């Protein structure tokens, strides 16, 4: 893990205890890993920036866990199991040691929860906001990665968990929406990567990805990858109790807002029972919200009367690049 000379002690205090097999104690220029026989390596990377992807005053342990979990969600969508990760931490020079201690504690908590370790990375100073990036490595049985391409006309559109909590959670966390239980703000600050369900998707889902930039926008990605159109029934959208309490006026935000980190799947009718069994066995809800049909890539959302809702541009690119891995 590269660092400025003055930062070697910081790394030893906070990051070396997180290092796992292959990290070489963070003392070399790179990690050395052996991929298990019959497995393929799955690699993804994401970055989050204070004021864009998290609030500047969010606790550092939650920031660390969000950073790791958003990347774990990419593995879940590919049907991959976690192996390890590298992270780059860019913070202002006056960042107190207590911030690093909290950040490392958050990583440690989720390393234990999800079964992976730090492999390396970099620490740098920046005059701008806190900027964090993470590259995650996972493995999947050879030829078994679930791709975005594969949706066909007649396949059902399925999602895990509930949709819209992340977008509403940002409103709650910034004082723009009542959130008496803290459920919505909690979902924004701490995603729930659906790894257990993701590991069951091979042979069940024809295509999948995670919902990070908004349901409508991400469904559009599946449409373009498969060369099909999609129709969503708004009445079928799975909403949490907290989202329902926020009222129907926020339905459009639930459809187009980001930060849900749920799985979005194309499933053939003959595989829907298998998905439902996997959902029960992993205790992760899965809901059919529509279907793919023949036609140019496009997403239509219909109200209970069958009329198409006007969506607009939709989606959430966080003011910058959206996910490309």
Image (spheres, grey):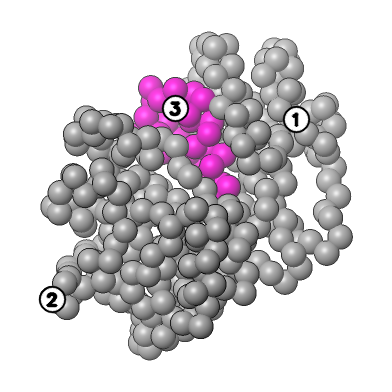
Quadrant location of residue 186? Answer: top left
Cα separation between marks 3 and 2: 47 Å
What x and y, as percent, mark residue 209? 50, 62
Q: Is residue 7 visible?
A: no
User: Along the horizontal axis of the image, is 177 left or right of 67?
Assistant: left
In the image, is residue 159 above or below residue 56? below
**Residue at (30, 32) in percent of width and height:** 182
Q: Is residue 31 visible?
A: yes
What x and y, as percent, mark residue 198? 57, 59
User: Along the horizontal axis of the image, is 325 left or right of 29?
Assistant: left
Secondary structure, mark 2, is loop
Over which residues does the magenta segment extend? 47-74
Secondary structure, mark 3, is loop
**Residue at (13, 52) in percent of width and height:** 249
In the image, is residue 278 above or below residue 57? below
Q: Quadrant of the N terminus?
A: top right
Which numbered disc covers residue 129?
3
Secondary structure, mark 1, is loop
Q: Nearer the viewer, residue 238 or 252?
A: 238
Name the residue tied to disc 2: 305
Name the residue tied to disc 1: 19
């Amino acid at each position: 893990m590269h660092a400025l000379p003055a930062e070697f002690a910081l790394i030893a205090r906070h990051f070396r205890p997180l290092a796992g097999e292959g990290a070489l104690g963070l003392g070399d220029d790179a990690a050395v890993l052996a991929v298990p026989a019959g497995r393929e390596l799955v690699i993804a990377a994401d970055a989050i920036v204070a004021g864009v992807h998290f609030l500047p005053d969010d606790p550092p342990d939650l920031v660390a866990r969000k950073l790791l979990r958003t990347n774990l969600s990419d593995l879940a969508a590919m049907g991959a199991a976690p192996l390890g990760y590298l992270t780059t931490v860019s913070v202002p020079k006056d960042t107190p040691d207590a911030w690093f201690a909290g950040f490392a504690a958050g990583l440690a908590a989720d390393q234990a929860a999800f079964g992976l370790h730090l492999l390396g990375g970099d620490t740098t100073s920046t005059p701008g906001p806190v900027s964090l990036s993470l590259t995650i490595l996972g493995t999947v049985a050879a030829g078994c990665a679930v791709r975005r391409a594969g949706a066909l006309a007649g396949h059902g559109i399925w999602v895990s968990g509930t949709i819209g909590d992340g977008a509403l959670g940002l409103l709650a966390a910034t004082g723009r929406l009542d959130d008496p239980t803290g459920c919505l703000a909690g979902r924004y600050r701490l995603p729930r990567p659906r790894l257990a369900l993701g590991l069951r998707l091979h042979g069940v889902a024809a295509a999948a990805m995670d919902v990070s930039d908004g349901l409508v926008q991400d469904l559009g990605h599946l449409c373009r990858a498969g060369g099909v159109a999609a129709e969503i029934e708004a009445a079928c959208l799975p909403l949490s109790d907290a989202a329902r309490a926020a009222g129907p006026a926020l339905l459009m935000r639930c459809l187009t807002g980001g930060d849900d980190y749920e799985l979005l799947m194309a499933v053939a009718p003959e595989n829907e029972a298998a998905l439902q069994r996997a959902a029960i066995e992993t205790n992760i809800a899965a809901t059919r919200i529509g279907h793919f049909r023949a036609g140019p890539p496009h997403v239509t959302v219909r109200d209970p009367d069958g009329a198409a809702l006007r969506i607009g541009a939709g989606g959430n690119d966080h003011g910058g690049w959206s996910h490309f891995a």
